[in-house]
Amino acid sequence: AQKVTQAQTEISVVEKEDVTLDCVYETRDTTYYLFWYKQPPSGELVFLIRRNSFDEQNEISGRYSWNFQKSTSSFNFTITASQVVDSAVYFCALSEAVGGTSYGKLTFGQGTILTVHP
Amino acid sequence: EPEVTQTPSHQVTQMGQEVILRCVPISNHLYFYWYRQILGQKVEFLVSFYNNEISEKSEIFDDQFSVERPDGSNFTLKIRSTKLEDSAMYFCASSLTWGEKLFFGSGTQLSVL
């Protein structure tokens, strides 16, 4: 069965610090998708990134970057020069591709509460 | 950017009552989902729906739960006889295809008293 572990329950940083959120996953499939979602205090789930298991290239989007390492089953998320608006709960999620397709069943980690202080 | 819309944002009900949570997915999406999040816990998959039938459901989605796409735009989750432990935030989501990113609505906070 698939599993996602976000070992960091809460992280507190001061504005402009860099912060890395860890995500470790377990799956028996060779084809799967990894996601990061942000949940701000308003409660909605905001998509950040989707990564195919065959694409191990790291990605950078502005202040956000993601490090996907299949060898360690990790998909870590780094925020550079954090801002107060980055304060939110961040969820890592995994979706297995069943029979070559994915039924959209995301398995979420427990989430990491990030607080950025001014 | 198009949005998934959920109504109501808050729903309070008495134990044993039926509730219907409503969602309007993004118009050209074909795949629909319900997830829930009990306060302080992780988001959990309930059900996925495609072509007017359930594709997959979790253990949580027992006989008390049902989903329906009554017309071309709405997607509903019905809980037939609510229990205290059904209190949670319920999220509707939709996607264009399988494996693509899920767009989530803002959620319906269900409180069962």
Image (cartoon, coloured by chain):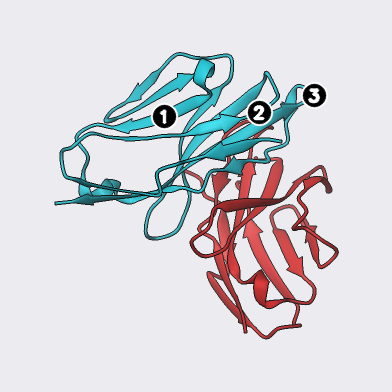
Chain colours: A cyan, B red
Does label 2 or label 1 sit earlier along the sequence? 2
What amino acid type should be assigned to the residue bearing mark 1?
Answer: Asn
State whether residue A65 appears in this view. Answer: yes
| Residue receiving disc 1 | A76
Q: Position of residue A4 (x, y in %)?
A: 56, 38
Q: Position of residue A105 (x, y in %)?
A: 68, 41
For label 2, count other residues whose C-alpha is less than 10 Å away and answer few (under 14), some (14-19) or many (20+). some
What amino acid type should be assigned to the residue bearing mark 3?
Answer: Gly
Please tell me the numbered disc located at residue A99. 3
Which residue does the image show at 71% across and 40% down from the upper left?
B30
Q: CA distance from mark 2 to mark 1?
A: 16 Å
For label 3, count other residues whose C-alpha is less than 10 Å away and answer few (under 14), some (14-19) or many (20+). few
Q: Position of residue A6 (x, y in %)?
A: 47, 41
In the picture, measured across the screen, residue A80 lies left or right of residue B23, that is: left
State whether residue B70 appears in this view. Answer: no
Q: Is residue B104 above or below residue B18?
A: above
| Residue receiving disc 2 | A27
State the image quarter where residue B78 is shown: bottom right
